[in-house]
Image: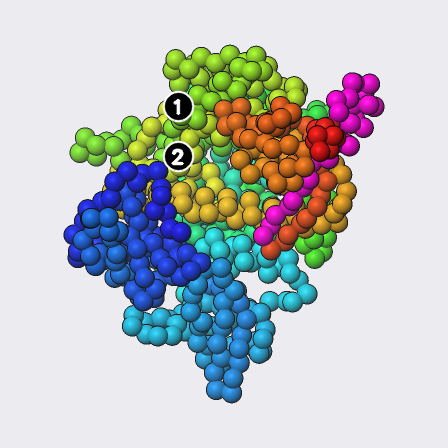
């Protein structure tokens, strides 16, 4: 209920009546509201009659009604809704003769919406629909909506994906005025625009992207110079040329701040005509780009660089698989250039790790889907040299752009700029991890951030291929601070860079658009500082986290969907998390995670949670379930509504495996417990 017991709450904050605060409204299931204000030690209570059109998740200005103190909590009323978390909702239509109502399907209370018959968009009585809130005047009893889409009852998967996007604040459609601005952008590049730019169309240029990608926002060019060095261009779609500040299109893009990639769809930050056509660096087409062009030695050492607007012409569109094949067999289209770029990228990569970058390996689970979007298989995507080739050159461009801006001063102060920062590890999280790693024989030097990074890399190297590798990587990542956008340039710890920003993906990330605009101002020697930039950085960081939540929820839905067909079956898995109420297991075969409840273990023993050892321990038997341990489980429930998998521990599976491997088998605790009876 609210967040009144948050860690920050040490004593009640005394504030007078009439004061206003900005915060986020958290509505409980009972209908009571709490406004969470970052600098207050306790949330402000809002009764339903005082919401004044605010809904759960909205950013609001709240006016305090009473002075806190004497054990009383501050109570307030919403003075203004500053920003809606979402304006689109899923529910059903109730149709009468003269009008219709929309009844939302929400776990948080909200009023029904009045739908004029002219706004039904062909929806019929009891249809399940997506509705957009279009008007709700202050003091008005009834919010007004319009139907933006009727859901297909046969396709529950489609509705589930849409609901995940909506509950995380990502609208399904672009506003009409934003689409209108996008439609007015000419497809043909004016000759006058080309004349203003560096023309690199004659230089060999290509893109490398996933096989199913349509928005190619980066390309690489390469040519040999007379002095024996190479000129390598990192060319990025010039979104800021097409998306002008403060237009309805720009506002819609900023509101989303990121594209969201779900297993069966993309919810794009920009309308598809821009992201997949105008700005996409498609082969055999002239395209406007913003470029970082480097002069480098054959060993990948940068001698000089140039930043500015260009026009390119991509000669070929490679997939990662195409490039990996060329690297593996050392043959294929543009093999010399690909192999040279790969050699440089690998040298740059090694150098990065030597200078303090942390080498966490990443595994990405992808679902193979049928035409309905139902999962029929699971693939594990690993980072190969073809991915690393692109990654290293993008990192280089991002780093040099940030470094370039960091040197500029305005009236003796740094230029406000959206840096991408990653702080040093959290000491509180690091201490138990170091103790845990020690149990596997891994030593840690925590004397300085550099020493910690070196220790991490040594640990990852030593643990590679060992049973504890996965668990140490997972826990290691959890000790890290979260990367974010901010104007405070503290560097990027994980990458080992003093200066870093996002410049290379403006089609799918709004901070990159902000970077392009400020960089152009710097190149024009006409920087106009944005006083709201820190607020915009925070918004982009928040939307990035919301996108990650949506992606995680969609993947979980697919896992549950996939494992539904395996109910009652047994699999081997690895313990991927531990809590007082049970432990999570990820199956080795499918990479699908489910919970083994501590209640399901009661017939064997009573288990207590040992936080420092990331394990559950049996009170009588001493049997441990520790993160990273292999166990056998049975799939007992798959709840699509809750996006939840329930597993049960299977003793027999472990006994059978032990026998097969010729190990001595300990008697299960369950049998001992029976004898006691």
Q: Position of residue 664 (x, y in %)?
A: 78, 18
**Residue 631 in the figure: left or right of residue 462:** right
The answer to whether 131 is drawn above or below residue 330 in the figure is below
Q: Residue at x 42, y 34 (%)?
A: 483
Foreground mark, 2 or 1?
Answer: 1
Circle 1 sits on which residue?
A: 427
Q: Position of residue 526 (x, y in %)?
A: 25, 41
The answer to whether 153 is drawn above or below residue 368 in the figure is below
Q: Secondary structure at mark 1?
A: helix
Instruction: Give the Cα separation between the discs numbered 2 and 1.
Output: 21 Å
**Residue 188 in the figure: left or right of residue 592:** left
Bounds of the magenta segment:
642-667
Q: Residue at x 33, y 28 (%)?
A: 490
Q: Which label is found at residue 420?
A: 2
Q: Residue at x 52, y 84 (%)?
A: 96
- Residue 607 shows up from this direction: yes
Q: Residue at x 78, y 32 (%)?
A: 652
| Residue 650 highlighted magenta (yes or no) | yes
- Seen from the viewer's position, the closer of residues 469 and 673 is 673
Q: Secondary structure at mark 2?
A: strand
**Residue 131 in the figure: left or right of residue 340:** left
| Residue 665 highlighted magenta (yes or no) | yes
């Amino acid at each position: 209920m609210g967040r009144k017991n948050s860690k920050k709450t040490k004593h009640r904050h005394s504030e007078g009546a009439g004061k206003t605060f900005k915060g986020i409204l958290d509505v409980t299931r009972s209908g009571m509201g709490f406004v969470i204000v970052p600098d207050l030690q306790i949330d402000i209570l809002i009764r339903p009659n005082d919401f004044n059109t605010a809904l759960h998740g909205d950013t609001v200005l709240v006016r305090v009604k009473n002075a806190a103190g004497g054990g009383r909590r501050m109570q307030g009323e919403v003075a203004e809704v500053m920003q809606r978390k979402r304006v689109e909702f899923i529910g059903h239509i109730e149709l009468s003769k003269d009008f219709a109502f929309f009844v939302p399907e929400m776990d948080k209370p909200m009023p029904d919406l009045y739908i004029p018959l002219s706004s039904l968009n062909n929806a019929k009585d009891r249809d399940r629909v997506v509705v957009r809130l279009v008007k709700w005047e202050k003091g008005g009893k009834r919010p007004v909506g319009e139907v933006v889409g009727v859901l297909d009852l046969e396709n529950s998967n489609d509705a589930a994906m849409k609901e995940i996007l909506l509950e995380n604040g990502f609208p399904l459609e672009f506003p009409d005025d934003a689409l209108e601005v996008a439609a007015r952008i000419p497809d043909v590049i004016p000759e006058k625009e080309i004349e203003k730019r560096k023309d690199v169309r004659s230089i060999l240029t290509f893109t490398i992207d996933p096989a199913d990608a349509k928005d190619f926002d980066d390309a690489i060019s390469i040519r040999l110079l007379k002095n024996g060095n190479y000129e390598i261009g990192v060319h990025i779609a010039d979104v800021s040329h097409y998306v002008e500040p403060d237009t309805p299109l720009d506002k819609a893009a900023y509101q989303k701040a990121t594209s969201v990639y779900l297993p069966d769809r993309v919810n794009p930050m920009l309308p598809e005509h821009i992201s997949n056509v105008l700005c996409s660096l498609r082969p055999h087409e002239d395209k406007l780009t913003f470029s970082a062009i480097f002069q480098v030695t054959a060993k990948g050492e940068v001698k000089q660089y140039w930043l500015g607007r260009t026009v390119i012409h991509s000669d070929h569109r490679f997939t990662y698989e195409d490039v990996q094949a060329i690297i593996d067999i050392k043959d294929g289209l543009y093999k010399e250039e690909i192999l040279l770029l790969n050699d440089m990228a690998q040298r740059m990569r090694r150098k990065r790790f030597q200078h303090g970058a942390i080498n966490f390996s990443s595994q990405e689970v992808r679902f193979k889907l049928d035409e309905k979007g139902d999962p029929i298989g699971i693939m594990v995507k690993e980072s190969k040299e073809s991915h690393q080739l692109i990654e290293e050159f993008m990192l280089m461009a991002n780093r040099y752009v940030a470094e370039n801006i960091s040197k500029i001063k305005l009236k003796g102060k740094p230029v406000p700029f959206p840096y991408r920062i990653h702080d040093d590890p959290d000491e509180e999280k690091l201490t138990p991890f170091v103790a845990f790693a020690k149990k596997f024989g891994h030593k840690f030097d925590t004397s300085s951030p550099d020493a910690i990074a070196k220790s991490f890399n040594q640990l990852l190297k030593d643990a590679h291929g060992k049973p504890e590798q996965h668990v140490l990587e997972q826990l290691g990542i959890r000790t890290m601070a979260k990367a974010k956008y901010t104007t405070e340039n503290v560097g990027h710890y994980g990458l080992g860079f003093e200066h870093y920003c996002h410049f290379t993906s403006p089609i799918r990330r709004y901070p990159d658009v902000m970077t392009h605009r400020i960089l152009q101002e710097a190149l024009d020697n006409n920087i106009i500082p944005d006083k709201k930039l820190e607020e915009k950085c925070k918004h982009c960081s928040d939307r990035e986290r919301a996108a990650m939540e949506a992606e995680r929820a969609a993947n979980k839905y697919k896992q549950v969907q996939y494992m539904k067909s395996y109910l009652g079956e047994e699999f081997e898995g690895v313990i991927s998390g531990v809590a007082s109420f049970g432990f999570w297991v990820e199956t080795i075969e499918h990479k699908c995670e489910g919970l083994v409840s501590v209640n399901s273990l009661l017939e064997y023993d009573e288990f207590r949670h040992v936080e420092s050892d990331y394990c559950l321990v049996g009170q009588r038997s001493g049997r441990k379930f520790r993160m990273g341990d292999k166990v056998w489980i049975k799939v007992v429930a798959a709840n699509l509504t809750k996006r939840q998998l329930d597993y049960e521990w299977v003793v027999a599976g472990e006994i059978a495996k032990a026998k097969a491997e010729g190990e001595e088998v300990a008697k299960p605790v369950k049998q001992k417990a029976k004898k006691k009876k």
